[in-house]
Amino acid sequence: MRGEGGEGEAAGTEQAAPPLCLSPASGGEDAGAEAFSMVFPSLSALRAACLDLPTPDAAAAALVAARQGQLTKPPGSLGRLEELVAWLACWQGHAPRLDRVDVLVFAGNHGVTAQGVSAYPAAVTAQMVANFSAGGAAINQLSRVAGARLRVIPLALDQPTQDFTRAPALDESAFLDAVARGYAAVASDADLVCLGEMGIGNTTAAAALAAALFGGGGGRWAGRGTGVDDAGLARKRAVVDAALARHASLVGDPLALAAALGGRELAAILGATLAARRQRIPVLLDGYVSTAAAAPLARLRSDALDHALAAHVSAEAAHRTLLDELHLAPLLDFAMRLGEASGAALAVPLLRAALACHTGMATFAEAGVANQEE
């Protein structure tokens, strides 16, 4: 179920081990708002940051490939597990490790829910953050199994975005503030960041943003989300089409579209994805909403998501379409559609398994096993 978190001003939640503990974080118009506004003072400044990105470390990846060639297995026989280790190394810039894995879940409220696009009321937002805090949600369990720290960051939940069929969801200031909060949430010593969301109505925002970025209307991009009936799906698709018509003049400007059609949690995911790239931290993207939130970066620069992998493909049908547009091959396909970074957290043990094989296996020389003939 897609919901959003917390009440009023945002409060962060971190988990190194159960139960969750509350810690101050970002939201609304708190005392730190001015500081966040200075991270990206304008869309132009944000756009410049999105275009100025580090490249992968080919030497680190080459060292991984060299070791893989000496391990006691036929070349390439571990398939994508081998690719995952090389991916970790080329972005971390050193021997790959997963000592610190962070799961960041951003939450925001959406004014468009007034049009009946979700099967759940917006009140689920605060209720679910309380559930996170109590350790009772799926992401709590999955983060624990993954050996990851969970932090839930609600964003001004007492201030829903505007209904984007009538006005931009966020004005420039609010959008940049949310981007900056996501950017600041990424810890510089993280080895891997998993990104997810909670937000009633945010599959509608994701559908509108994907449609504006890649073409097509509500029929292509809007699905049942939390489980709307046929009438609800028709409303949802009509809402997407109305939003596209209203904001047609912004097509071609990915950041302006993200502000007009997204939400605070989507903007924060964009900021966190950007921060991770600029700090050379690999990213696992969760489902449809998280992928749509990061997609404007790829429209600005085609390689902007090279440090990110799709953890899974959601049961929300348009997610597969979006992954195809972004040339992202999902790691898992478990017919999940929960959100809250659940798919991303579920993929972490897969990466740990890949790393364990790379570091723990013996080489042919160490094991006294004959290698293939030269």
Image: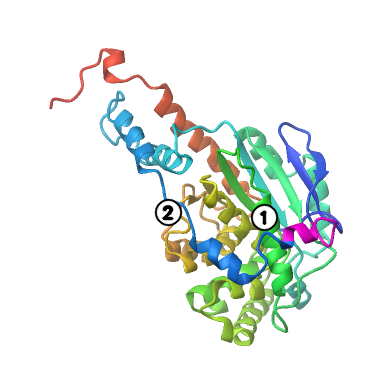
Could you say where residue 83 lies in the image, as x and y percent from the top left? Answer: 38, 41
- Of 349 and 222, which appears nearest the observer? 349
Quadrant where the N terminus is found in the figure: bottom right
**Relative horizontal placement of residue 352, taking residue 367 as reference (left or right):** right
**Relative horizontal placement of residue 104, taking residue 347 as reference (left or right):** right
Residue at far left of view: 374
Distance from Cα at disc 1 to Cα at disc 2: 25 Å
User: Can you say whether 16 is above or below 186 in the image?
Assistant: above
Could you say where residue 222 lies in the image, as x and y percent from the top left? Answer: 59, 72
Residue sitting at 34 percent across and 33 percent down?
Answer: 63
Task: Answer with the quarter of the image where residue 30 lies.
Answer: bottom right
Residue 352 in sight in this render? yes
Q: Earlier in the sequence, mark 1 or mark 2?
A: 1
Residue sitting at 46 percent across and 27 percent down?
Answer: 356
Crowding at label 2, few (<14), some or many (≥20) Cα neighbours within 10 Å? some
Secondary structure that dominates the magenta span:
loop
For the image, the number of numbered tags is 2
- Can you identify the residue that label 1 sits on? 182
- Of 274 and 232, which appears nearest the observer? 274
Magenta stretch: residue 198 in it?
Answer: no
Residue 155 in sight in this render? no
Could you say where residue 274 lies in the image, as x and y percent from the top left? Answer: 56, 56
Number of the front mark, 1 or 2: 1
- Can you identify the residue that label 2 sits on? 329
Please provide the residue range marked out in magenta: 27-36
Could you say where residue 329 lies in the image, as x and y percent from the top left? Answer: 42, 54
Magenta stretch: residue 31 in it?
Answer: yes
Quadrant where the C terminus is found in the figure: top left
- Kind of residue sitting beneath label 2: Ala
**Relative horizontal placement of residue 59, taking residue 176 as reference (left or right):** left
Residue sitting at 44 percent across and 53 percent down?
Answer: 306
